[in-house]
Amino acid sequence: MKFIFKIIFALMILFILSSCRKEWLEEKQSVKLITPTTLNDMELLLNEDALQLDARGASEIACDDYEFTTDQFNALYYATDRDIITWKSMEIPKFGDKESDEWDLSYSEIQICNIVLEGLEKIQRNESNKNQFDRIKGTALYHRAKQHFNLAMTFCKYYDKTNAASDLGIPLKLTSDIGEKVVRSTLEQTYSKIISDLKEASELLPNSQNDPTFVAKGGAYGLLARVYLFTDNYVEALNSADSSYKYHNYIENYNSVNSAPSRPFSGFYTKEMHIYGIMRRQIQNFSVGTISKELYEMYDQNDLRKTLFFRTNTEGNPTFRGSYASRQLFTATATDEILLIEAECGVRLNKLSDARNALNLLLVNRYKTGTYQPITSTNNNELLDIIIRERRKELVTRGLRWQDIKRLNRDPRYTKDLIRKIGSEIYTLPSNDSRYIFPIPQYIKAFNGIQ
């Protein structure tokens, strides 16, 4: 890990040298002088494009939303990608000089946030700078929590409060010290820190932001709702979702979206996004594989998502085109996810009326005008089935399906074995298999002996 953080720190220095004050370009500068010292420096650092990236690409291609022909499968450049797609091996390798995105990208972003947070400790917050100071601190805490959460979703067991105090979490990196000995926390410690960072961020951030590359309260509460949902804390997930919706309640009516362009949603098209966030990995899912026919057939003809999210290729197979991030896969939170969290938590807490209201509010904006029939079910199990189904349909390609499968596999009603057929070969991933947890890359363990 020390080796990895040395690489990260070197990259940070290069970034700072290229982005901030001119005098930092002088030779033989002390490392201390390279550290950002003003609020403007720190704001520039937090505006780095890398902070928009979420490294959840490996789990995305491993989920059941994709199909691969023999030609598509064989055309993959890396054998390791083929191994992940067929669940033969979930090891995420080092590609020559290019480090694994899932691990190193996340920790490089965490390092940026720690540098900023430590810099803030040396600046006195006062009446004249308090708004900028709080915004910067809240933004750094949000991004640090986001990346710790991404790592936990990929490299850890699903959170179970019964075992969380003993299950292994991730190394929590809370300082910029590259010489610090890093060990794995427990899963309980991991999620406690993620939650505390997001709670503090939600208090510090402004009510709204004009620029979609910056996060505001709605986004912090939105990510907090996602975290709570994935820890089965439905009360707090619902409270956080309600808070998110209070600050950010825009819903896109898909009847107003033009389906003619190849990408109906451009980079900053919809105000549903809390913040611009995209997936990063070698495989770009717009061009690899096709959408599962099982998933595609879930959309009926009056569901506008069927045409806005997908197109069929020359072989008649559906491919995805409906990302909120245009040619990239959108991964951040947005109003639609918040409504689905409200709906699911409402059912699980026996607040069926609230659950139906949230679900119907979303879906009436997804169907052709005049065709949507509101859901009126008063049966908990039936309503939960609908919500779980709509969650998969609405949040396709957002890097959440793998984690949803992990949590739902613990419920006998939703458990499923994943099956992938490529040519004449059939591959299976049984429910609750250990391969749902990606191993920490071997080259990381080799450097520091991390458990």
Image: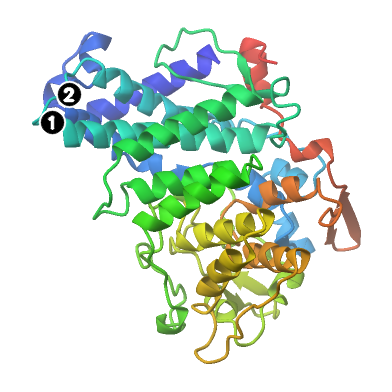
Among the 4 quarters of the image, the one containing residue 287: bottom right
x and y, in percent, of residue 51 in the image: 39, 40
Q: At 21% from the left edge and 31% from the top edge, which residue is drawn?
A: 133
Mark 1 element type: loop
> Mark 1 belongs to which amino acid?
Asn
Closest to the observer: 420 or 357?
Answer: 357
Q: Which residue: 40% across, 37% down?
A: 142
Q: Pointers 2 and 1 in contact (CB under 8 A)?
A: yes
Task: Identify whether 210 is placed above or below 449.
Answer: below
Is residue 344 left or right of 255 when viewed as pictured? right
* Residue 169 visible in rendering: yes
Render colour scheme: rainbow
Q: Examine the rendered structure and indicate whether residue 24 appears above or below residue 435.
A: above
List the residue tagged with mark 1. 129
Residue 105 percent coordinates (x, y): 49, 33
Q: Position of residue 326 (x, y in %)?
A: 43, 64
Q: Is residue 422 left or right of residue 133?
A: right
The residue under label 2 is 125
Q: Is residue 150 above or below residue 111?
A: below
Q: Amino acid at mark 2?
A: Arg
Label 2 sits on a secondary structure element that is loop
* Above or below, comparing residue 106 to residue 374 in the picture: above
